[in-house]
Image (tube, rainbow, N blue to C red):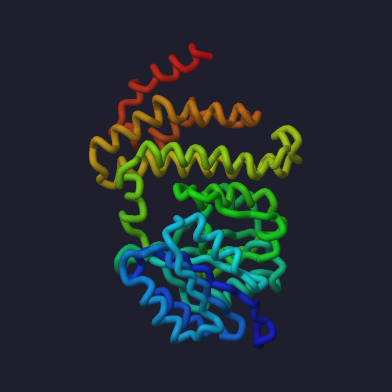
Amino acid sequence: MHNLVDFLEITILIPCYNAEHTLDRLFKSIIKQRYPKKYLSIICTNDGSTDNTLQVLKNWQAKFGTECFTIIDQENQGLAESRNILFNNVKTPYLTFIDSDDYYEKKALINLCKSSDEGSADITIGKIWRRNKNKKISFWLSNFKTHNINQYIGNNLFFVWNKLYKTSFLKSNNFHWVKGCDMLEDQLFFTSIIPYVKKIRFSKHHTYNFVYSKNSMSAVEGGNQERKFNQAIQNLDAAIRNVLRERTFSQLEPREKKILTGGIYNFLMQIFSTFVLWPAFYGFDKQVQVSLRDSFYSEKRYIINEILNKYGIKFYTPFGWWRKFTFVVLNLKNRYDVNKYKMYDKNYKNKK
């Protein structure tokens, strides 16, 4: 990319809710991109914020100009529907999402464009810095060496952000976020779209700063844990249904089966991490830890198994190596009594 005609027309999509304290950092990182204004659009939702988010957005709109900066002020719709609204307003050939509490690395947009194979890739993915206060750690799983979609699936990085999308790829396949599904919504979306990706490219550069905080995880801790747990499992069901689209699993091509089962494994690991692993390691209330853990091992994993059986997906059941992986590899053996949960397996199998 050596001259202006090589730049891609991109829209940055930013869902915002009570983000007054982080938006300045985000928009400063966009300015530092030095991306030609004529090729850049920004669309933000103010999703019923109760703080000063709307005014901060208006301040930045005045700096960028209304011709390239759009604010959609709306009653609270939730993250999934906000992304749908943003997506439906895109008019450029390419788009990218960024969360309101994150920010870009320098030259992020240029590096994504350079890596997109002249814009021909359906999705182009950059490396990620994980930021925690003044520290930064590279997401080692994002250091891809080949443009291989299976490698991406296996690395458990189903984030909506840190990617450049071809707009026509998403719209021609009628992809969308399921309204009301705001728990593991990234995993639902990506499990749905990944089997349809024909061309994927990876940038060798870090392009995205994911700002890590306990608040990003404690949505599980903030009440209604059972409802959120159930929604995450419902999202798994919805993701499989969205991929199959009236087909059966047996009717899929081998490549599609491999990609779908990889996506499902990714989704299952996210469910386990969110509702069992994170509470165990990040100081959640003891009662919350026990409640979520027991719910998973006594009920939720069997519901997951029934969902997979319903679609004829036999590659995986949440028994056997699953327990070994979660308790040995993740070093939870000293925190949880493995033998306590063997009775659940026995009771479930007797019911069948």
Q: How many marks?
A: 0
State the residue at coordinates (26%, 44%).
284
Q: Looking at the image, which is closer to me, 109 or 54?
A: 54
State the residue at coordinates (45%, 69%).
73
Q: Is residue 209 above or below residue 284?
A: below
Coordinates of residue 341 in the picture (x, y in percent): 37, 22
Judge left or right: residue 273 versus residue 247. left
User: Would you identify the image quadrant in which residue 88 lies?
Assistant: bottom right
Q: Looking at the image, which is closer to me, 173 or 105?
A: 173
State the residue at coordinates (69%, 52%).
196
Q: Point out the image quarter for the N terminus.
A: bottom right
Q: Residue furthest top?
A: 350
Coordinates of residue 71 in the picture (x, y in percent): 48, 74
Residue 172 visible here: yes
Residue 129 visible here: no
State the residue at coordinates (50%, 60%).
82
Q: Residue furthest front?
A: 75
Q: Looking at the image, which is closer to me, 17 or 32?
A: 17
User: Would you identify the image quadrant in which residue 53 lies?
Assistant: bottom left
Coordinates of residue 70 in the picture (x, y in percent): 51, 76
User: Would you identify the image quadrant in which residue 317 lies?
Assistant: top right
Coordinates of residue 60 in the picture (x, y in percent): 42, 81
Q: Is residue 171 above or below residue 36?
A: above
Q: Looking at the image, which is closer to me, 324 or 84?
A: 84
Q: Is residue 169 above or below residue 194?
A: below
